[in-house]
Image (cartoon, grey):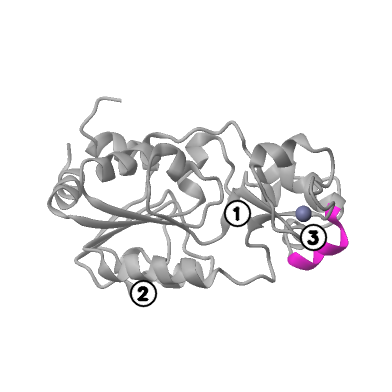
Amino acid sequence: MSDKYQLLKSIIKQSNSIVVFTGAGISVPSGIPDFRSASGIYNQAWKITYSPEQIISHSFFLSHPEEFYEFYKEKMCYPNAKPNLAHLYFAELEKKGKNVSVVTQNIDGLHQAAGSTKVYELHGSIHRNYCMDCNKFYTLDDILKKKGVPHCDKCGDIIKPDVVLYEEGLDEMTIQYALSAIMTAEVMIVIGTSLKVYPAAGFIRYFKGKYLILINKEKTDYDQNCDLVFNEDVIEVIKKISWRNF
Ligand code: ZN
């Protein structure tokens, strides 16, 4: 094992308070495509003549719910995706008694599925859906079972996913919890994000702890500001530092 992995391992071992900031890259090994990578959904041909940015916007949701849901169900919901080694590793650290918070840009719920309990979802979650009128809650399964645009059983209005669409702001409470976790952590580990999505990417500036670590396949503009950088697959890094033989 080279020194870099040994160093990361000992930093994690010595630190009690860890914040993990994750983007699409951590869920790619679970079979969820990265929005912005070459093979991601932004570059896939789509039968409708709208761009994904247009489709996943608040105004489009209201004006074209059929097209929105057709795209959303097919391209953004992965009901069979399972947490991978990286999700499981950080959930395990929490179980071992460390104070681990997860701030994520992902909407897939895989950190919670792995067992993490302090997860702040900046862009919401596909697993929460609410009637736009009476606010009744629906699961992802409820939404996928309904053909076309899902309507509320109780009042008949349209159900909206609790996912932050373009033109919408992030949830204030979630931001507060996320910033508080970042500001009080000793170590921040950024995984699978090119740090190009604002305002979420700006959160890193609030970190005042000892070690800033970045694990991302491609180089980012932020690499030079980090104490340790791994430009490689997150699973490979976790395999080298984890205590189990996966
Ligand atoms: Zn309703």
| Residue bearing the label numbered 1 | 36
**Side (left or right) of 186 relative to 200:** left
Q: Which residue type does callout 1 highlight? A: Arg
| Residue bearing the label numbered 2 | 205
206 or 173: nearer the viewer = 173
Q: Mark 3 or mark 1: which is in front?
A: 3
Q: Which residue type does callout 3 highlight? A: Phe
Q: Quadrant of residue 51?
A: bottom right
Category of crowding for the residue at label 2, using alpha-carbon neighbours closer than 10 angstroms: few (below 14), some (14–19), many (at least 20): few
What span is colored magenta in the figure? Answer: 58-65
| Label 1, ligand 1: CB separation under 8 Å | no
- The image shows residue 162, relative to residue 200, as above or below, that is above
- The image shows residue 85, relative to residue 232, as above or below, that is above
Q: Quadrant of residue 235?
A: top left
| Residue bearing the label numbered 3 | 61
Mark toward the start of the polypeptide (3 vs 1): 1
